[in-house]
Each structure stands twice: as structure tokens, then as C-alpha cells.
Amino acid sequence: MTVARSAGGIRLIALNRAAHEAGLSSGMMLAGAKALVSDICVADSDPMGESEDLIALARWAMRWSPYCAPAKGLEATHALFLDITGCAHLFGGEAAILADMVIKMQALGLTARAACAATPGAAFALARFAPEARHGLSAPDGAALRALVGALPVEALRLPSGTTTGLRALGLKTIGQVATQSSAALARRFGIDLVRALDRARGLEEEAIDPVAEIIPRRIRLRLAEPLMTRQGLELAGAKAVGEMCTLLDSYNEGARRLVLNLYRVDGVVLQLVGGSGRAHRDPALWAKVLCERIEAEANGAGLDLGFGIDLVEICAPMVEVLEGQVMDLDPVAAAALASADALHRLADRLSARLGAGRVTRMEAVAHWVPERAVRHVAIADRRPQMSHFPEALAARRPALLLERAEPIDAIAEVPDGPPRLFRWRALAFKVACAEGPERIACGEAHDRDYYRIETSEGRRFWLYRQGLPGQVDHPKWYVHGSAA
Amino acid sequence: MRPDLTALRTQIRAIETEGRPALSCLPTGADRLDAALGGGLALGGVTEVVPAAFMDEPASLHFAFACLAGALQQRSGDLVVIEDASRGQGWGPAWGQLYGPGLQKLGVSPSRILLVRAPDVQGFHACVEDAARTFGLAGILAVSGPKAGFSLAGARRVQLAAEQAHSLVLAVQGLRTSAFAPARARLAIASRPCRPVPLGTALPGLGPPAWKLHLERARNGARPQSFDLEYDDATHSLYQPTTLANRSSQPHRLSA
């Protein structure tokens, strides 16, 4: 059960089936609910998370219709609108598509009610309040629809709770009763929104829905007459699909940064292989090579189980960029530079396909004063580093090698705030001959660091720091954080 | 010498050098070292950099980056750093990960570095060979784990790939790594105390980083010898310091 703070106290927002059976209902005060059932377990409601989940569900629901939107506006309308115009016959009619929806949602662990009507307003009212909607309700048009909706309570109108309470106070409990009133009088008393909502619910007025923004990816599907059982066959099919994809991209003047190869196994399992590139291109030979490297890497890692075979090879380009044709450079120096940049890109793509995307990286500078956070490693397949240059004054005092985790050392230093003179690290003793510092880096109370670049009497260079400033901490600790300073 | 042996030697030499471009060199900036190496670091070949002692491993990497800073100045393209990051290997746990600001100080711009971390030794060898075969890179730095080095055949493949693509490959090895047999030269690096900068404080300040380089082996037949080297962070150049110890033996003539 989730709860939220509202006027008058904490109220219940959403409940599970056990709570409903115990007689609790949404909108009830938490104190009242506890009086009814003492051992209830509640969590704070998370409207942001819920709406994100709803959007994710809307994406998933695009299996039935590409035109799919989560309900917006009023709070707690956990509803999806699907425009199934021209889609229903693919699933065997309206009743069949609704039944399919209810079953698939149940498989996800959701309780779904589905209704289909001429307008979104009518469909919403029926889905929420008609008892038949539990199995999917396909409503008729015209007068029959108005009769069906007329029997529903006024809450089905999707209006603020103030309006519905007002209507109930007047004795207007169902949509049918409200509809008998003159619309001019209703508009005067409750505002034009009520009249509009009434028309929408009764199937008289259309309503626009706002589908989830989804970039339709470039997609190629290769249906195979005989399931593929071998890696060689798979590589051939992949190369063919890549070739078609590159032709498709060429017609849109685009290049892909990433290609996803989905392999549909006969038994319904989908294997996914992702190949990335450091720049957008549509060279079929290069893409085929990258995907073959992925197939090989997966096969070596024993992660590619073809089972009883692959009967559908699908290739999608989720990341595309506009790619203008390149002008060939006649200047030999510039052409050579271009060719070498090209060779590097190919090498990087090949290696990241073979080793995994996270293993081929570039460094990105981050404006952060804590040394270990000043550098981020960006996989070349993900994006280009935004900034790779560090401030000169800062770089001048940094070591070439930085330990991932600073290691504690025993050090003898001048009190109160001098550089270390002797220290012991990994069971070896070092005598400090030269030192530069301190460079003070604030990391919060008692974690402030005084960094020293030091050289030992043998000429080995380290980057040490003292944690805790002399005035704040009695016995500051020493750490080694880098070498080759 | 028997004539058939001579003929055989000429035949082998012809096979070895056939179709291979003549090797050129990239000067490091330290004159006597360049002279001993036959002009500098071999282009189209592997130069092996090893530490003289276990604690000198960071110094050997430091020196390798000092050399590559020169390569980046003189050559276009990017630097590919390939690291053997297999379990129980790698420099990360031992001495630390490569750190962008510190490399920038040495003159190796982080924007020109491509980092590759190989998950196992076989992958590492394949990556080094692949990179060595790629045209147009400024340099390749192969950082082996402390134990597992290249096999004889693997090293030979890398060397041939580097010759084809004319690439500059520095192989930084651990102390106990097996030698990279076909390398053009093997340089052992030891830390050396720098010339301190008096700051007026209790401890003097750090001078430019200094190393003692021992040329252990060179294909051009140079005898093993040692060099004192320093690196200037401001101009990004490697040089031989003119200290009192290395002064010429001829006495100075004071002008009247």
C-alpha cells in the first residue's frame, strides 16, 4: 500500500488486493485504516517513479499499436490510451486484442481493465467503472454507447474531486442523470470542463492523445526458412542484414553509432548483441566485422546458445546521426591525416567489439577538486569526451599514476604541518629527500587533505597526503595516492 | 668459413630483409642516447623498456611517457595505450592507473590517448599486434603485466606488424616479465635522485625527474652503456644533464 500526505493527514493512495478485501479503500485516512486493520504495511507513494513506470509500460504496449500514450493531467489516473485504429484486425478483432491485453498484463503481474470505444473519454469511463472491463469490453457506437456510459458514476468523467462531490450533492450520481440536465445550466454552475468531459465520455467529442515520443529505429528483419544452427550461417545472415541496413541508412543519408542484432530463437528466446562505433558510419564491411567480433566474443565466452536454431535475424539502429558525404581531400597531407584518423576509428571499433565497450576508453576531464574524481573514462562507443584538457596549473602538481584507493602509510613528519621525512609503505622504508607542498584540497570536515609531491633518497617519486588538518585532528593520517609524481 | 655457409647466410639475410622498408628512427632529444640507438627510437620496431629494480616500475612507465611526448610532438595521430588488465596482473593495483592531469604535465595530451584494457593475456597480445599493424598512429604503448610477457612467436608477430605499418611500439615490461626477444633495443630504467631546487624550506623542492638508463641490448650492435637522463616538463624534452661528474676531462682555461 502506498500513502501520501494530503489536507487533513496521511491518506491511502494505492492498495493491494488483500487490503481491498479487508475493507480498505483508496482515499481513506491512514489512521482510520489502522483502526480497521492494525498490522498494515505502508510505503510513501512515488508519483515520479509511477509516471516513469507508466511511460515504460506505454513503450511496451506499442506491441499493439504504435500510437500509445499514458494518461496525463489528473492525479492517480493510471491509464494508458491506445489508438487501435487499423490494428485490431491483426490480432483478430477488437474483443481479441482487448483479451490479449488483459492476459499479457496479467503475465506482467498487473491487474488490467480494458475497454474500447469511439472516443478516449468513453473508453476510460468504461475501463474504469464497467464491471465487464475486467476481461476486456468492446463497446458499441452511438446510442448504445451512450446508454452504457450513462449507467456509470460521475467519477468516470475524469473531473477534479470538487466537481464530482458537487454533482453528487445535487443528487446527480450517474453520467446519465447529468446528461439529462441542460448543458448551459451545467456550464454556468460547474464550468465548461464538465460539459466537455460529458461529451467526451458519451462518445460525442474526440480528444487528442499525446503518444510517448519514440524514435522509430531503422530496422531490418530477415526471416529464415530454415533455422540457423551454426555460427558461420549466423555470420552470413548478419552480414546480409547489415548490408540491407546500410542501404537503408544510405537512403536516409544517415550513419549508425550503434547496431543491435536481435536473434530470435525458435523457442521464443531473443539473444541480443550490440555493436558500437566511435563515429557514425554506414560501411557494411566494417559493421559486419564489428558484429562478427561480437558473435565471436560471445561464443568464446560460452554466452551464445543457439538452441534449436535462429529463425529471425533483426537488426536495429537505435543511434543514428546525419552523415553527409565526405569530400575527398586532394591535399596529400590532409588526406593522410584523414586516412590515419579513419584507421584509428576502425581499430578502436574492432577492439571495443572484441573486448567489450567499457574496455576501450578515452579520458574526460571533470571539473572536480577531489583528484580521483577529476578524470572519467568514457567508452568510445558511448560518446565523445566533452573536455579532455586539464587546467595547466593543476596538471603541474599531479602524478602520472594514481592509485584507485589511497593506501595508508606510517609517516614521520614535522609537527605541526611539515612534509613527511620518513615513511613506510608496503613494508618498505623510504627517506624523503625533496618535497613540494602542501596543496590543500578540501574534502569536508576532518577529511581535508594536504598533498605533497616527494622524492625519496633513491629518486622515486610519490604523491602523499595527510588527512585531517593539524588544528582539527590530533593524529593526522598519511596516505600514498600516486607514483611517478 | 666454408663457402656453402656463406651462401646460406646471404640467403637468410635476403629472406629476412626482403620486402621490408628500411628502418628509420625518431630522435629522443638526448644526443648520446640517440647516437647509441642509431638515431633514436626505432620506427617500425619495438623498443623494450624494463625497470632496473622492482621499485623502478613507475619510473620505467614515467620514462616511456617522456619518450612518447616527443613522439606526439613529431608525429600526427593518436597514442594507443594497451594494458594487460587480467586478474592478478596490471598496473592498477600495483602502482596506480594512468592519470590524465599527470600525463598532460608530461606533454602527453589526454585527448590523444586511446586506452585499451585487455581482460587476459591472449587478448592483450592480439590487441598489441592489431594496433601495431594500424597505419597512422603516433605511437603504441604496451604495458605488460608484471609476470606474463610475450611468447617468442607472439613477440615476433608484433615486431613484423610494426615493421609493416612503420609504427613506434614501446613495450613496458615488468621486472620479471620474459624479454621481448625481437626488440630493436632494451632499455633498463632506474630512478635517480633529481637535482633539488633550493626553496629555503627544510626540505628542498623537486627538480626535473631524472633517470639512469642502461642500454642493455641493441640490434644495431651498440655496446651496453649507461646514460643519465632528465626530462623538462616545461618544454617536454628529454636531455642529458651537464653535471660536474660528466664534465669533459680537459681542464678549463680561464681567460686572462
Image (cartoon, coloured by chain):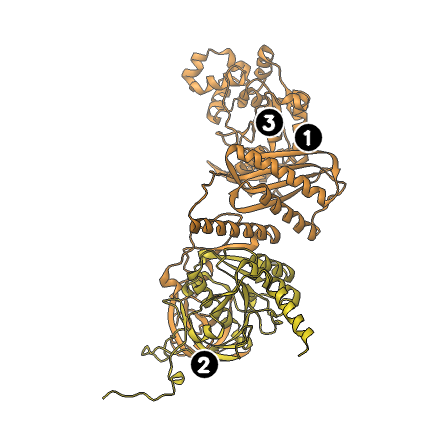
Chain colours: A orange, B yellow
Mark 3 is surrounded, within 10 Å at the Cα level, by few (under 14), some (14 to 19) or many (20 or more) other residues, namely some
* Residue A273, horizontal then vertical, whole percent: 63, 44
Checking the image for residue A103, the label placed there is: 1
**Location of residue A92 with respect to A387 vertically, above or below:** above
Residue A245, percent across and down? 59, 36
Label number found at residue B98: none
Report the amino acid beneath label 3.
Answer: Ser
- In this rendering, the label closer to the viewer, 2 or 3: 2
Question: 10 Å neighbourhood of mark 2: few (<14), some, or many (≥20)?
Answer: some
Tell me if label 3 and label 1 are in contact, CB under 8 Å. Answer: no
Judge whether A386 appears above or below B255 on screen.
above
Please identify, in this view, whether the residue under mark 2 or under mark 1 is nearer the observer: 2
- Mark carried by residue A457: 2
Residue lying furthest right in this view?
A: A308
Disc 3: which residue = A65
Label 3: which secondary element: loop
| Position of residue A122 measured from the top left corner of the image (x, y, whole percent) | 56, 19
Q: Residue B210 occupies which quadrant of the picture?
A: bottom left
Where disc 1 sits, the SS reads: helix
Q: Quadrant of the N terminus of chain B?
A: bottom right
Give the residue drawn at x 50%, y 28%. A210
When the figure is inspected, residue A290 is found, relative to residue A220, above or below; the finding is: below
Which image quadrant is residue A153 in? top right
Q: Is residue B240 visible?
A: yes
Image point (46%, 67%), residue name: B67
State the separation of the CA atoms marked 2 and 3: 74 Å
Q: Nearer the viewer, residue A208 or A377?
A: A377
Name the subunit of mark 1: A
